[in-house]
Image (tube, rainbow, N blue to C red):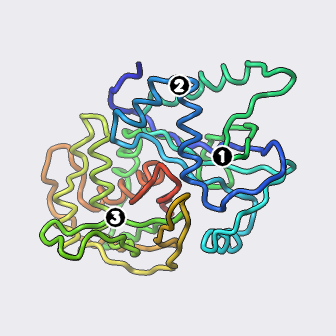
């Protein structure tokens, strides 16, 4: 059984896939990728898959939708209209997976090595099935210098050390790119008369407290208090964070049984000084906490349904 020890490292991987035959698939397949990824892990280590799916609610991985070799404008339109896209066995497609528990990477590596050594008659077995379409695995990429800009690996300790060396002036801009549909499932705990809703703007109070919760769920015990959620919330309430610039568009994708609204694009936040005093021995100044969370978002995702293709974010 996989240890539930706190993760030490974070991984962002690109899986290069090739379809076995021609066919079509829905343009946003995050739900299908999520199911296919868990199915692959289930075959490799059934107890781990059950633990990931049912026994642990910390969302220890994220998956993207299947990425096509198409211009972004065409992909966005296909997603909005839910127009199924053709698959060509001569072309390569990608899926991005992030692992938020350090022990998952050696599991994935060992299972992959075992998978590659198996024989399935004269043919290599399919790696992943999305709907009715089967895909072979061509390559796994983890190096940070990949041209896509969506791969890499780090540790919680390295993230903290790198942020701690940043020199901050009176104001620090932080730009987040929302690479896939992003939204926040919101409710008003004080008044439920109007019900829940999906927020379609990345307001600071939606972005950073949620990332602080994820940090405190996933960080090693000695680094949990580096981030102080209450201090961040107060800093935001005091207008320490403002939106300086944005290039955002509302967007819509379709899951198997329902549409989902949200947004894509970029947003630049201005982190304004002064920082004030740190409120815990281990914590960083508040602006460095927010900078840390912006970099952490690359691995953990942001907002609603990150294990199903939504909320893919990077700091730039």
Q: Which numbered circle lies on residue 185? A: 3
Residue occupying the point 31% across, 39% down: 219
- Badge 3 marks a residue whose secondary structure is strand
Q: Earlier in the sequence, mark 1 or mark 2?
A: 2
Comparing 233 with 279, the one in front is 233
Q: Which mark is nearer the camera, 1 or 2? A: 1
Residue occupying the point 41% across, 51% down: 296
Q: Is residue 209 above or below residue 94?
A: below
Give the residue number, with chain letter if any, for mark 2. 107
Mark 1 and mark 3: Cα distance apart in space: 27 Å
Residue 60 spot, x, y in % from top left: 41, 40
Residue 17 spot, x, y in % from top left: 73, 44
Image quarter of residue 3: top left
Total of numbered circles in the picture? 3
Comparing 53 with 164, the one in front is 53
Mark 2 and mark 3: Cα distance apart in space: 32 Å
Q: Where is the N terminus found, in terms of image quarters?
A: top left
Q: Earlier in the sequence, mark 2 or mark 3?
A: 2
- Badge 2 marks a residue whose secondary structure is helix
The answer to whether marks 2 and 3 mark residues whose Cβ atoms lie closer than 8 Å is no
Q: Dot 1, how many residues are within 10 Å of its Cα: few (below 14), some (14-19), or many (20+)? A: many
**Left or right relative to 196: residue 118:** right
Residue 231 spot, x, y in % from top left: 17, 60
Image quarter of residue 134: top right
- Badge 1 marks a residue whose secondary structure is strand
Residue occupying the point 73% across, 19% down: 118
Q: Which numbered circle lies on residue 130? A: 1
**Left or right relative to 249: residue 27:** right
């Amino acid at each position: 059984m996989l240890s539930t020890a706190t993760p030490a490292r974070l991984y962002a991987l690109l899986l290069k896939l090739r379809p076995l035959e021609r066919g079509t698939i829905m343009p946003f397949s995050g739900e299908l990728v999520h199911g296919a990824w868990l199915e692959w892990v289930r075959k490799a280590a059934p107890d781990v898959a059950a633990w990931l799916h049912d026994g642990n609610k910390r969302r220890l991985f994220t998956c993207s939708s299947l990425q096509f070799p198409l211009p972004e404008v065409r992909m966005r339109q296909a997603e909005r209209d839910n127009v199924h896209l053709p698959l060509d066995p001569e072309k390569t497609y990608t899926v991005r997976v992030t692992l938020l528990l350090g022990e998952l990477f050696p599991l994935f590596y060992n299972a992959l090595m075992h998978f590659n050594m198996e024989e399935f008659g004269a043919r290599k077995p399919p790696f992943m099935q999305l709907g009715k379409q089967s895909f072979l695995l061509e390559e796994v990429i983890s190096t940070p210098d990949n041209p896509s800009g969506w791969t890499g690996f780090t540790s919680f300790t390295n993230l903290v050390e790198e942020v701690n060396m940043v020199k901050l002036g009176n104001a620090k801009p932080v730009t987040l790119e929302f690479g896939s549909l992003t939204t926040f499932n919101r409710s008003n705990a004080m008044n439920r008369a109007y019900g829940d809703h999906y927020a379609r703007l990345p307001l600071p109070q939606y972005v950073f407290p949620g990332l602080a919760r994820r940090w405190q769920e996933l960080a090693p015990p000695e680094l949990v208090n580096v981030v102080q959620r209450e201090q961040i919330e107060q800093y935001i309430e005091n207008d320490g964070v403002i939106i300086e610039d944005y290039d955002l568009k509302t967007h819509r994708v379709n899951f198997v049984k329902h549409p989902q609204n949200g947004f894509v694009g970029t947003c630049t936040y201005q982190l304004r000084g002064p920082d004030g005093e740190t409120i815990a021995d281990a914590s960083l100044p508040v602006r460095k906490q927010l900078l840390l969370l912006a970099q952490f978002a690359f691995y953990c995702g942001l907002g609603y349904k990150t294990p199903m293709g939504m909320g893919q974010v990077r700091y730039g």
